[in-house]
Amino acid sequence: MKYETPLFFHVMRYAVQADRDVIDMVSGNPDWEPPEALREGLHEYADLESDQFQYPPSDGLLELREEIAARRGVDREQVIVTNGAGEANYLAMARALERDLGSEVLLTDPVYPYYPGKTTMLGGTQRFVETAEDGQLEPAAVREAASEETACIVVNTPNNPTGAVYPEETMAELVAIAEECDAILVSDEVYDHYDLSGEFASALATESDHRIVTNAFSKSLAITGFRVGYAIFPPELVENAKSRHMLVNVAGSRPAQYAVAHALFETGPEYYEANRELLAERVDTFTDALDAAGAEYTRPDGAFYVMARFDGYPGTLENVERLIDEAGVAGMPGEAFGSSREAWLRFALVTPRVEEAAQRLAAYFE
Amino acid sequence: MKYETPLFFHVMRYAVQADRDVIDMVSGNPDWEPPEALREGLHEYADLESDQFQYPPSDGLLELREEIAARRGVDREQVIVTNGAGEANYLAMARALERDLGSEVLLTDPVYPYYPGKTTMLGGTQRFVETAEDGQLEPAAVREAASEETACIVVNTPNNPTGAVYPEETMAELVAIAEECDAILVSDEVYDHYDLSGEFASALATESDHRIVTNAFSKSLAITGFRVGYAIFPPELVENAKSRHMLVNVAGSRPAQYAVAHALFETGPEYYEANRELLAERVDTFTDALDAAGAEYTRPDGAFYVMARFDGYPGTLENVERLIDEAGVAGMPGEAFGSSREAWLRFALVTPRVEEAAQRLAAYFE
């Protein structure tokens, strides 16, 4: 079996080993602080009785699952706490494919590279639907590509890498298409707290037993290394997903789940608001500089990324490495996200040096 | 797709909900303290800069991988830090099966129930080799069952549920059989620190590119809920396993990995020795009481468990529930571990109330 390994780790290693100062715009690691209550939660956990260091319930610590269920307006039994959104998406896609109702996975192009990798690993077939230039997904294009061969449709909103936020009509239409084809819509909403447009709509808003919503605290609490995420399944699909979760991971890591639960209880909306504002400022700063450099780009409505295009400098891995060595800015090659963005580069805005990076790019491409 | 969900969680829930005091001899959760340095490690981690809260390397924190590699005498690149032994076994079995050299998984009977569950989930076929009455595995019986259809042979030493520890000759023979059939020996050695016989031999002692060793800190550091384990692959098998790990989990949980690394550096052999002695005492206490009750049992050479048989009381789930309600002792039904032990019950010695439990059993079966 061969399956693609996402390129992120390769590019990050190249940037770290470079013989110069490099501004890292590769990873999706927030550079802002987690809530103070997260650290408190870890300290608190470290002093608990040792029976609290043993297996948590396989589907997650009860108080965490209940809090997630309450916030998302679903039944607790529909929630599985996972090892980040990565495992949540794996469980969701595996659950869709194992129904034996088609083996095709509809993905967008550009796409977050883990999805095609998971598809191949799970024995599914990839089929891509190209998004519009601004990253929006046309339901009509999805409907045209969907068939009884479609096992699932995987979308990500707010979107990595395009920054698109799909409006409510799009989400409702995607759910309807999944129902028509007896497919499952898998909606990865890990950037939901970074919607800059006010247009974000969760797939949960459309009642259906044909959609699974995945998410994580990796981005919203700035803790990508803690690996705490979740998936919300329709009641009739959840049991098998719990079995798979148990057979693959037994359970998630308890110290991380405890700290996340504590942070959720103790952190008010102003924490999330402040990070959203910081991100919005960085979008302005970076796109202003791109304007000055005469680059083409998509202004993001959400998530952490800007895709940009520089004349005569296609988004290959080779060019990304050249940009690291010669300009001191590390981005991701557009080709990593699919054929439609081979000319583009993706820059993550999770560094305090956004302005400097933009200046370096402007100087380099001048 | 249907696959078995291990019964552990069901029985534990039944015991917790019982309307009386119940001694829990179900789970494999150590009831002794983790090393003090583990708590220190968590406190230390909680105060680190927030960039330390972001993605660790996918295959594990470097200092942890290096320490594991040094202790096990292998190259660092062969080590993948996993979400406990659960994920390690999943990766190992998946890697063996995806070579497309047979789809049969040889398992022992009795068996740790997650292995057949994983086999089915991964699309493999189960084939069981019955162990001797004392739990020892006869290489001749394995050789007879093995064929070109065999993708892997999964063993666990020290063994759950029998307590058997396979001697060096057995391990060497199992590796040889794997080589003969172009199969992979998966040796789960998670109880290696609880060998009471001095006979434990790791599969690593036999050089081969046909064996994968899995392990975890769950039992040795008394932290089943932290989910930090590892797998050691032959160099030619490790890359695809890393890809699968990345595509399923992205990475393991960083606070847990950090605390484990700190605990490994700071904890001396006396910690492990003391727990081994405690366990040996409990084996004596429990088997003495079983003797007094006239029960048949296997005296464990390692791990946490004793299998016992009471006349006219087969090891069904129904009887386990009756024992919880009527005797206040929760064990596991022998039938959960395969057809060869349907008459037996398994008791875990990870409770300070081992003596009381034995007395309750003696009184109940008198």
Image (cartoon, coloured by chain):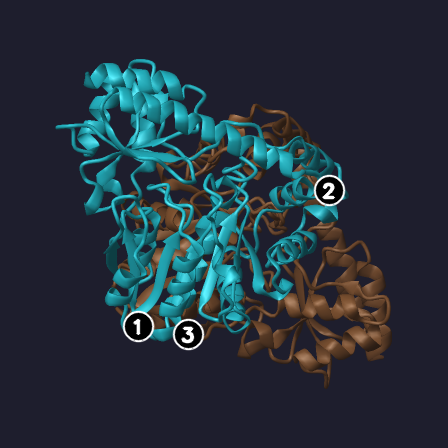
Chain colours: A cyan, B brown
Q: In which quadrant of the rendered view does residue B135 lie?
A: bottom right
Q: Are marks 3 and 2 on the same chain?
A: yes
Give the letter of the chain under mark 3: B
Q: Nearer the viewer, residue A90 or A139?
A: A139
Residue lying at the far left in this picture: please name it. Answer: A312
Residue A100 lies left or right of residue B215; in this view the side is left
Q: Position of residue B174 (x, y in %)?
A: 38, 59
Give the letter of the chain under mark 2: B
In whole angstroms, how far apart are the C-alphas of marks 1 and 2? 50 Å
Relative to A92, residue A195 above or below:
above
Q: Position of residue B52 (x, y in %)?
A: 52, 28
Q: Residue at x 29, y 14 (%)?
A: A19
Q: In which quadrant of the rendered view does residue B177 lie?
A: bottom left
Residue B25's disc is none
**Which mark is nearer the camera, 1 or 2?**
1
Residue A102's disc is 1
Label 2 sits on residue = B33
**Which mark is nearer the camera, 3 or 2?**
3
Q: Nearer the viewer, residue B101 or B246?
A: B246
Label 3 sits on residue = B1
Residue B132 lies left or right of residue B237; in this view the side is right
Q: Secondary structure at mark 3?
A: loop
**Res. B346 visible in picture:** no
- The N terminus of chain B - image quarter: bottom left
